[in-house]
Image (spheres, rainbow, N blue to C red):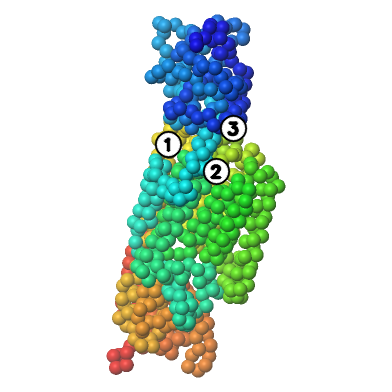
Amino acid sequence: MSMTDDEITAAQAPTIQTPTVRAREAMQLAAQAPEQAAAPGPRIVSADAVTQRLPAASAAPIAVPQRVPAPQQDPVTPQIPAPAIALDNAAPMSMPRMSMPPMSTPVQSDPEPQDSSTPRSIDWKQSIPYDQTGVLIRPKGWTNDQIETALIDVMALRRLRKSAGAAAEEDTRPRWRRLVSWLVRLPNARHAVLAAILTLQAALSLRNTNTAFMDEALYLYSGHLELGHLVHGAPLYDDFSTYFSGAPVLYPVLGALADQLGGVFAARLLSLLFMLGATGLLYLTARRIFGMRAGLLAAGLFSTTESVAFVGGLATYDAPAIFLLALAGWIVVRFAKSPWPFYLLAVVPLALAVGTKYAALLFVPTVLALACFGALTTHGRWWSLLRPMSLGLMLSAMIYGLVKLAGADYWTGISSTTTARASGTTPTSHILNEVAQWGGLMFALAALGGVLYVWRPRFAYDAADQPGRAGRLGLVIVLLGTALLAPVDQLHLHTDVSLYKHVGFGLLFAAPLAGYGMQRLIGAHYQRIQLGIAVWVIALALSVTQTTNLFQAWPSSTKLVATIRHYSQPRGEYLVENSAPVIYSLRDDVNAEPYQIISTFTWQFTDLEGRSFTGAAAYTAAIRDDFFNVVAFDYSATAGVDGQILTALKANHDYYLTTTITQQTSQGYDTYFVWVKWEPGQK
């Protein structure tokens, strides 16, 4: 059936409605008639066809010509051309199928005639790629906000059609096939990008090697002792729960099991797996909040930070604690819209995170806040507030019960390492400089993303429903404030001990905003991609330089361990300034049990006359009584005590300096002085 001129003119008459209203009505029509399927390939319809309600059963399909001359318009009230919106077969449409003549180029309406003698030039910014956005031609006169609103609504139609089609298909498939299709998913482009990010992160963590760090050695050998105590009832030789910053029965035992399989490398590989898991969970969380592009950019930035690369190669509490926090954050965001209380599953990883490292308690309120903000658009204000309250009450009851069950020693450890941590003397300017080096770039991108997200938002089509400006502002304050928690706490204590690790906890929550900020910096059509590449290269260069310096900050213990092993003897006693690496390396030597190796940090000694000494006096009294067989110090951790030990050694002629071990580190040169007691008949 052909159309008359009047019918064509009536069909092209504009409807005075915003793009959002047109798309909403189209979605309502799609919900009322989901059984109408679209043919494969893109369909091009006019805006009037989308917004007008047509009868369910229509006559023969109407043939639309490729180009229709625009009617004469009144110069006083010019007509606004209707947008040409392209919907592929993933968008549900409730109007009858319109037959289209074959064409090689998209149909576009020309609102006004143009002079054929003047060449027509179209700015590339005025045309949006169909394969990325679903909009073929940008209508003349539309603003950026109008085209973005239409784009979002078109993608919403696509998601609705896709979900409806998937639900219909699942109803016809057996349950086992549905399970297999869910477990086995074909990789796509975003999976390849994520795999490349994780590969780079693994390379950054594994490229640096050194002997066991003091903290690594302490946790691993204590894990071996705890494991022997749990399995065989062997003695512990020390009460680790009174001064460890995490439960000694959690990560140390897990790290010791890995150490039994492959030494310190296997224990570090376990930490790397935890950090890779944290990056993957960060991507999933950021994708749900800000979209896929922002999620990939957040994962890419997070993987190149100093803290992530360093902690991923260090066998300490931090990697599993970060992973558990990331898992809890993903759970509350993933089930934010569910009417069932699945978000309460996050209480398990939260409790384990706090038990693994007590300082993780500082970041629990952020996870509770995510549970609230994620549910705002679906469940309303009051029901959303119920989520963090219920989750917090369950977590508090669980932690209190576990600590009461563990005993008073755990309260002592929590107080001495976390809640009542000793203050230091590090200058404020030095701490601020370190914070800027290790997390300044990520925080700047997160701040940029936060400002744009609140006052100039552009929501991705695959992101979750976004709250109003007040809700967005609250979310930004929570995420940015979390990134500052660890630096502010250590500024208050005037100490930078472990700051290079604690910065990563806050950056985990600031990374989604940083990914959004990077996305806006690059642009919707990658028109400023060179800026994004430059920022990422700077982050990568900083990570490589900083992790190299950190891994070379402590001297290798290989020569020192070989020297002490050479002079070891049954029932010998050894005084070593940093005793943990020596204890860990000599754990298979029956002449060097953990209780035989003493550090210079704190000790109590009773001399031959029955007098008791503590502190530096204990070491000098023991040297006076020829208690130690080997004494080794390097003026690094306890320089004041080392000076008094040297004076006592020089005063006792039963000791002599056997060797000095000098090594270069990123902090300068380190020299170990090894003194040995003369054997009977050797002097």
Q: Residues within 10 Å of mark 1 (few under 14, many from 20)?
A: some
The residue furthest left is: 682
Amino acid type of disc 2? Ile
Report the side of 260 relative to 365 (left or right). left
Under tag 1, what secondary structure? helix
Location of residue 431 in the rendering, given as x and y in whole percent from the top left corner: 51, 56
Circle nearer the N terminus (1, 3):
3
Location of residue 190 in the rendering, given as x and y in whole percent from the top left corner: 42, 42
The label shown at residue 289 is 2
Circle nearer the N terminus (2, 3):
3
Amino acid type of disc 1? Leu
**At x 55% / y 48%, what residue is drawn?**
334
Res 617 seen here: no
Q: Quadrant of residue 264?
A: bottom left
Q: Is residue 273 above or below residue 620?
A: above
Look at discs 2 and 1 and give the one toward the viewer. Answer: 2
Under tag 3, what secondary structure? helix
Report the side of 389 relative to 678 (left or right). right
Location of residue 407 in the rendering, given as x and y in whole percent from the top left corner: 60, 75
> Separation of disc 2 and disc 3 at Cα?
25 Å
Q: Is residue 246 above or below residue 512?
A: below
Q: Residues within 10 Å of mark 2 (few under 14, many from 20)?
A: many
| Residue linked to disc 1 | 531
Number of marks in the image?
Answer: 3
**At x 66% / y 48%, what residue is drawn?**
384
